[in-house]
Amino acid sequence: MNWGETHTAINHGDYVKLANAEGGDVGVAWEINPPNTASIQVYWWNDGHRWSKYYEPQNLTLVPPAEIPDHAIKLRDSLGL
């Protein structure tokens, strides 16, 4: 997998946000579709409801632990992780 120097592998259950969104919302990586991780399903939280969308890996970035909001932790818990 060659994502370039700035990308880190995203795994099931990781906290992610859109790479082009400064301070954007935090979601949870869910389904990672091979081959070569062509797309990653991310769950988001919106007014107490989960929803998901697929993204190309280069459009996502991992969220540092110190920047994970409480609602993202609740979202991840609601997914059974």
Image (cartoon, rainbow, N blue to C red):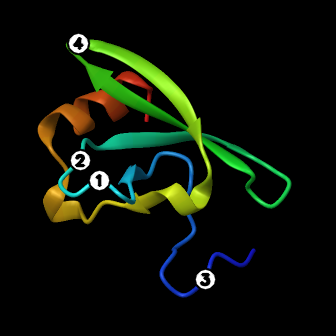
Task: Tell whether 30 sits left or right of 15.
Answer: right
Q: Nearer the viewer, mark 4 or mark 3?
A: 3
Residue type beneath disc 4: Gly
Question: Which residue is denoted by mark 1 in the rendering?
Answer: 21
If you read the primary sequence from the N terminus, does the residue marked by circle 1 or circle 3 appear first? 3
Of the pair 64 and 55, the residue shown nearer to us? 55
If you read the primary sequence from the N terminus, does the residue marked by circle 4 or circle 3 appear first? 3
Label 4: how many Cα within 10 Å (few below 14, some 14–19, many 20+): few
Residue 63: x and y, percent? 30, 60
Q: Are marks 2 and 1 in contact (CB under 8 Å)?
A: yes
Q: CA distance from mark 4 to mark 3?
A: 36 Å
Disc 2 on helix, strand or loop? loop
Would you identify the image quadrant in which residue 19 lies?
bottom left
Residue 27: x and y, percent? 36, 40
Q: Nearer the viewer, mark 2 or mark 4?
A: 2
Disc 4 on helix, strand or loop? loop
Residue at x-position 23% and y-position 47%: 24
Question: Which residue is denoted by mark 2 in the rendering?
Answer: 24
Label 2: how many Cα within 10 Å (few below 14, some 14–19, many 20+): few
